[in-house]
Amino acid sequence: MNSNHIYTDIKISTKTIHSNASRSHKHNYFELIYVLEGKGVHIINKNHYDFSKGNLFLLTPEDIHNFDVKETTTFCFIDFTESFFVENPKKKSGKAELSGFFKKLEYVFHNHHNTNGNIITGNDELIYEVLINKLIDEEQNNRQYKHIIVQNIVFLLLNLVARNIQENIIVHSQLENPKNKVYEIITYIQQNIYEKDLIKIKPLATHFNKSPDHLGRYFKRETGRTIKNYINDYKTELIKTRLKYSNLSISEIADELNFTDGSHLNKIFKRAYGKTAYQFKESID
């Protein structure tokens, strides 16, 4: 069983592999892989992960992977193409806006290294199975409102993946140090990175029931960085991702991430990477 359908921003396909290992290959896009049937080993960047029915994997650009199947295995692949990343048409202001999908995918992309192969955790196996099978059903049947239904299913899947990753980070941090709450602070900052009024020191301190001075000292002691430095560092990671995988201009990125202007963004970016965002963009074009 092999089928595929390409929407303007999402490609959905199913593929059956009968035996032996597939050839290693690299993608230039993001991909979710769900195991519909079968079992084997998924090799990602030379790391080996056993898989079976109901497992879900995330691949990000530049990941190299292949499968070594132990029995006939069927996968569902969800690929996010380039146009997935930016709203289109542009808003009335004339500026492009990073899509809500990619804002969610950003969090997943910058934290997926905290997963150990299979993403699904807790009691979410059934809902993933239902959503993936509904996605395949919509792809195979040309029914009314198919495109919007597919987009909403994918957005729900990304939210579930983000929650699983967040819970995994917090659980592991609490196992290492039950009293350490720094990952909760980091997660809160990452998830509210576009809301500048929520990640200022006073609102942050209020949210975590600490005084501003106490929160600042605690964060610096646990991470070696001030909260302001961490926010700027995380923003530079987001800038780099956007420059590589979206067609937003420097000024549009600056606006989205609440920089004063493109010059302010370039100053912060150069401090982190030794080159301006313009220079980085030119180097990858």
Image (spheres, rainbow, N blue to C red):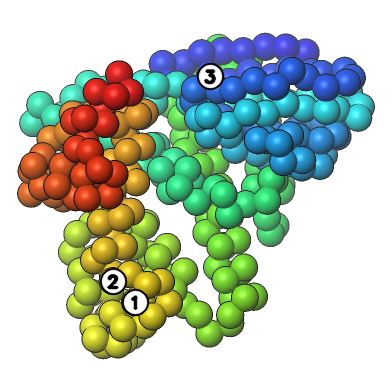
Report whether 260 appears left or right of 236. Answer: left
Disc 1, SS: helix
Q: Quadrant of residue 234?
A: bottom left
Report whether 242 appears left or right of 164. Answer: left
Report whether 150 appears left or right of 248. Answer: right
Query: Relative to the observer, which residue lies in front, 196 or 176?
Result: 176
Residue 90 to residue 155: above or below: above
Judged from this view, the residue extending furthest toward the front is: 274
Q: Residues within 10 Å of mark 2 (few under 14, many from 20)?
A: some
Mark 1 → mark 2, Cα distance in angstroms: 5 Å
Camera-side mark, 1 or 3:
1
Disc number for residue 220: 1
Amino acid on which the number 2 mark rests in the picture: Thr
Residue 92 to residue 50: above or below: above
Which residue is drawn at the image coordinates 12% and 35% (left, top)? Answer: 251
Query: Where does residue 98 sit, x and y in percent of width and height?
Result: 28, 35
Report whether 99 appears left or right of 2. Answer: left
Q: Residues within 10 Å of mark 1 (few under 14, many from 20)?
A: some
Disc 3, SS: strand
**Mark 3 vs mark 2: which is more N-terminal?**
3
Q: Which residue is mark 3?
A: 11
Report if the CB atoms under discs 1 and 2 are less than 8 Å apart: yes
Amino acid on which the number 1 mark rests in the picture: Lys
Mark 3 → mark 2, Cα distance in angstroms: 41 Å
